[in-house]
Image (spheres, coloured by chain):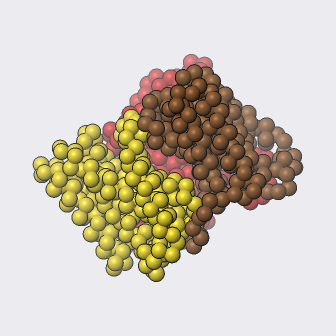
Chain colours: A red, B brown, C yellow
Amino acid sequence: MDFLQTIPFETVGVAVFALSGALMAARKGMDPFGFALLATLTGVGGGTVRDLLIGADPVFWVGDPSDVLVCLVVAELVFALGPKRVARIEGGRRGRALIWADALGLALFAVSGTAKALAVGVPALSAIALGTITATFGGIIRDIFAGTTPLVLRQEIYVTAAALGAAVMVGLQSLGLEPFLCSAAGFVAAFALRALAILRGWSLPAFPARD
Amino acid sequence: MDFLQTIPFETVGVAVFALSGALMAARKGMDPFGFALLATLTGVGGGTVRDLLIGADPVFWVGDPSDVLVCLVVAELVFALGPKRVARIEGGRRGRALIWADALGLALFAVSGTAKALAVGVPALSAIALGTITATFGGIIRDIFAGTTPLVLRQEIYVTAAALGAAVMVGLQSLGLEPFLCSAAGFVAAFALRALAILRGWSLPAFPARD
Amino acid sequence: MDFLQTIPFETVGVAVFALSGALMAARKGMDPFGFALLATLTGVGGGTVRDLLIGADPVFWVGDPSDVLVCLVVAELVFALGPKRVARIEGGRRGRALIWADALGLALFAVSGTAKALAVGVPALSAIALGTITATFGGIIRDIFAGTTPLVLRQEIYVTAAALGAAVMVGLQSLGLEPFLCSAAGFVAAFALRALAILRGWSLPAFPARD
């Protein structure tokens, strides 16, 4: 497997999740160091949980902190924009930019998380689970730290999109296809499904909430 | 130590905690993938934290995802029952089934967590702490992700029951008793104490809440 | 590097964070085992996350549970004081003792976390990130488990103080200064900045909160 081909997925995923963390920090009225912490936790959180679970020692960003630097730069760029411009980016409809950055990160991490799990040779079901966890935990950590209802709990398709992307990638790779193609197909599947959920309010049948 | 004898404890514990996660997903009105995520996190969460702390590489379910499969099956069975039947199982009194599944998981994981910690040769106090953490973290993760007040914070005896089960097991094993007997005694101690707390509202003297 | 010289920082940090966890347990009206759990999680939580990230197997307190014992003793001493005396310690102004214990733990862990990261030879930016995480995660875990707004989200200088202490320490050590001096300077920098933030309400420019 040509691992280099998956690296851009990872770093772009880190950057867009860091962006979603910085936008959340903006909403919560944090200072520049709060932006830095929330952007970094969101950007590297999912990959960190994945690395802990597969036993990578140390975790990716500890050995090479360039992804932490990416998060810090994203955080301070958003801070430097100032409240008015950030509010304009979010576009009137509250939180649209945050939701789209989150969607992009979700699809990118579903693919990069699955790729790294497959690279260390775990069983297929574990690879799908690890891809789904990598994709969803950055956003979950962001939402829990910020004290808001996790996006993952909303009725829209969310975990589903991450699991689909991971499953598509594992399935195609088991057929012996080119890794880059598998990654691209997994990314498209996850992002397209999440985008449709956001744009059309698509959802799966669900239980009625009681609490 | 005959480790095989403790395995059923672990898998049954995974299943009942997964059940408690699925019942929480039902309350929160989640879709099938939300059920899958919450059941899996609750089912394997406590054991995952334990494995990370003792440095097991990789974590148990990554190498052999059969416990993840158990969680997925439990999640989708509960989803397939549909809202009405799930509500009937919960029995009118809100959340009774969830509380009992949680109690069973608590007692099973107190024992299986302690067993795995003893098996890698940690000091007695660490083994008790690890058993207590294994028993309580699945439920804590479930409650935090679902955005409800953790059961662990309620005035009823909860952490106490897990710690008692772990301590009974470590104590008996240090006397040289048969491992299966130690596990069984630890399980009974933890479950009986938690059951009495649920049925009779037993509690320890506590501070008055101010917040 | 004389590692022994940094150990008191770590154990004193564990004790004061355990104190802040016990004071939170008091506010939440918990029982003696709830005090034990919250004090222990807060006391050893930051160092545990650091050890997981740098790949220390097992985590520090698993191999030698003396810091867990420190947490348990602190928890039960606070419980034994009883509600009235604890309220008097907190001094009328709600939570002052908790905020000061947290500030002391923050400064001590910024230094001890950075020291342990440097000792395993990670890059400078990773060492600063790990010091900041060690310093802030115990308190974050305490606040999330207790269901209150994390201190880290408040407008006062908080993450900033931890990052400053870690950066001062890394900077001085890269100049070849005596490790103990570097630790002491890092501690003073972090604690002084946090103390000024508490006493004078110092804060950095921040975004206005919208949520």
Nearest the camera: B164 or A181? B164
Q: Residue at x 87, y 49 (%)?
A: B88
Q: Residue at the spot x=55%, y=41% of the render?
A: B167
Q: Position of residue B29 (x, y in %)?
A: 75, 53
Which residue reaches farthest top? A176
Residue C4 coordinates in the image, percent (x, y): 22, 46
| Residue at 75 percent of width and 56 percent of height | B200
Classify C117 as above or below C148. Answer: above
Q: Is residue A137 visible?
A: yes
Q: Nearer the viewer, residue A169 or B68?
A: B68
User: What percent of the width, then of the height, locates residue B104?
Assistant: 70, 42
Residue A125 at least partly seen: no
Q: Residue at x 21, y 50 (%)?
A: C5
Q: Quadrant of residue A66?
A: top left
Q: Quadrant of the C terminus of chain B?
A: bottom right
> Looking at the rendering, in which quadrant would you find the N terminus of chain B?
top right
Q: Residue C87 location, x and y as percent?
A: 48, 75
